[in-house]
Image (cartoon, grey):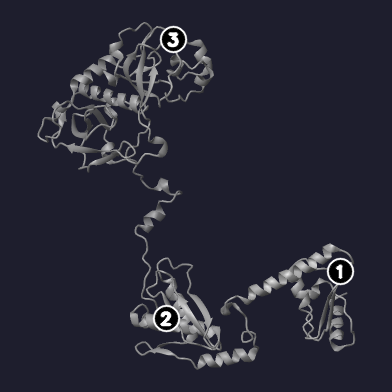
Amino acid sequence: MSIKEQFNTMHRFRRGEINCLFATQVAEEGIDIPDCDLIVRFDLYDSPIQYIQSKGRARRANSTYISMLEENNMQHFRRLKEATLNASALRRFVSVLSQDRKVTDQDLDTDQRAQDMELESKSQRIFKIPETEAQMTYYSSQQVLAKFVSSLPDGDGLHPEYIVTPTYKGSNYIATLILPDSSPVKTLRGTPQRSKTLARASAAFEACIDMFYRGYIDGHLQSTLKKRLPAMRNARLGLSSSKRSEYTMRLKPDVWSQTGAPAELYVAVFTMDGSALPGKTGRSLLVLTRSKLPALAPITLHVGTTERRTVKPVQYDQSTAVGASEVALIAGFTFTIFKDVFSKEFDCKGENLPYYFAPCSNRDASDVKVDTRRLIDWALLESMAQVNETMPTPGWQITDELAHKFVYDPLDGSRKFITGAVNEHLRPSDRVPAGAPPPKSRGFFRVAGTIADYSNSLSFNARRRVTWDPEQPVYHAELLPIRRNLLCQPEDDETAGCKSCSIILEPMVVSAASH
């Protein structure tokens, strides 16, 4: 059928010229004839909404609604029961909704109802400001309130919230206004009104009057609150990812930008109140710079889960004159610390370092009047320059010289040890004692697992080509923790301290810092 034929058929059906009409599923929503007293549905519904919509075609009190089922078809019967049960559950759900969410007959009135509301709104209060002659009505108050909310901090996207409830008698409505948390006025109630729309307008009207007398709205009905723009907003916009090359970026402080052979150096002493490792004693560390460091507050180090140490820096006003040979000694010590302790090597000359490390002598470093040159342990620096780092060779039997040394695995920077005394009861071919921390080398787990295998990080194939001295001594050792950031609390996997183990020193490197 064409569209014209469909309209003609519907017109004839309404006039009674046709008393029976066959329709597709469009009859669920598109056909609404109140005088129809018999509805027969041949195709069953797939949802309770279809059931309710099709049943709604039988609107008269004496109308009959028939659902056609196939005889002895239990599936059709179950679909009918399921639709009726779901429709009843939906009806119960709607019945318990709050009154402000229900559409009543008053809300479904025709144009006459809208005209009555318009006449009623015109008779409502008008707030007029004599100084500016600005006036506010019920409906304009909602616009004023919306502009006020948008002026609040973080007010973008926020809006007033109205909760409309019926009065005790049920004939009127009253609205409660809720404003965002950043508003100076949080909540306020309006006066009872005949409709929900007027109830919302009443609450907005009362809120605007209240904020006007409090000074949050001026005589021109504008908000007195101003948004505070972020500081340095232009700078942050300028430093976008696409404009970085247009600005000079500071990569490090100016004090570290000075290079070249220094003629004098300023000394700062860093002293810890205790030891970072249990049972170990240390000495203060000197930091030498080309210009005096600024005053530094004491630094708290988290050396354990609950243990803390305080590092107190002391700066000296007078500088120390140094020569080229002395700069070379200090630079060698600095390179050794970075290489052996932090596993970092730098390809640069010693005179180009921005700062230097140096060992502190046993003198009292807390005396600010002491000669800073005498604070540097020059004897230790000279001995380190002569010895350098060494690797034990087969046949070494001078065991006392290798006890209490700082050694590290050249193939795994995380394995750094402090040696102890020789274990006379163990040999390199013995199994690794229980309790030793497992190595990270995967090749270790494919071999016999001896002390000699434990002491190196070679690959599986390289282990088969290397033979270690079977007569060399086995040392007690402590594997140092690899945690370096002591300014923060340790993580769960960083709480472990030194771990005891047994190693041979032939695969290891004896650090020059041990001498």
> Which residue occupies the foreground of this view, 418 or 312?
418
Residue 75 falls left or right of residue 333: right
Q: Amino acid at mark 1?
A: Leu
281 or 139, which is in the foreground? 281
At which x and y percent is residue 151? 41, 71
Cα distance in 3D space between marks 2 and 1: 60 Å
Which residue in the structure is indicated by mark 3?
468
Who comes first in sequence, dot 2 or dot 3?
2
User: Of discs 2 and 3, which sits in the foreground?
Assistant: 3
Q: Give the SS element for disc 2.
A: helix
Task: In the rendered structure, find residue 353 and report the number of the disc placed on it.
Answer: none
- Which numbered tag is attached to residue 207? 2
Q: Quadrant of residue 494?
A: top left
**Quadrant, the N terminus:** bottom right
Q: Are marks 2 and 3 in contact (CB under 8 Å)?
A: no
Q: Which residue is mark 1?
A: 69
For image coordinates 77% across by 86% down, the residue present is 61
Callout 3: SS: loop
Q: Quadrant of residue 196?
A: bottom right
Residue at horizontal 48%, vertical 86%?
138
| Secondary element at tag 1 | loop
User: In the image, what residue type sits under mark 3?
Assistant: Trp
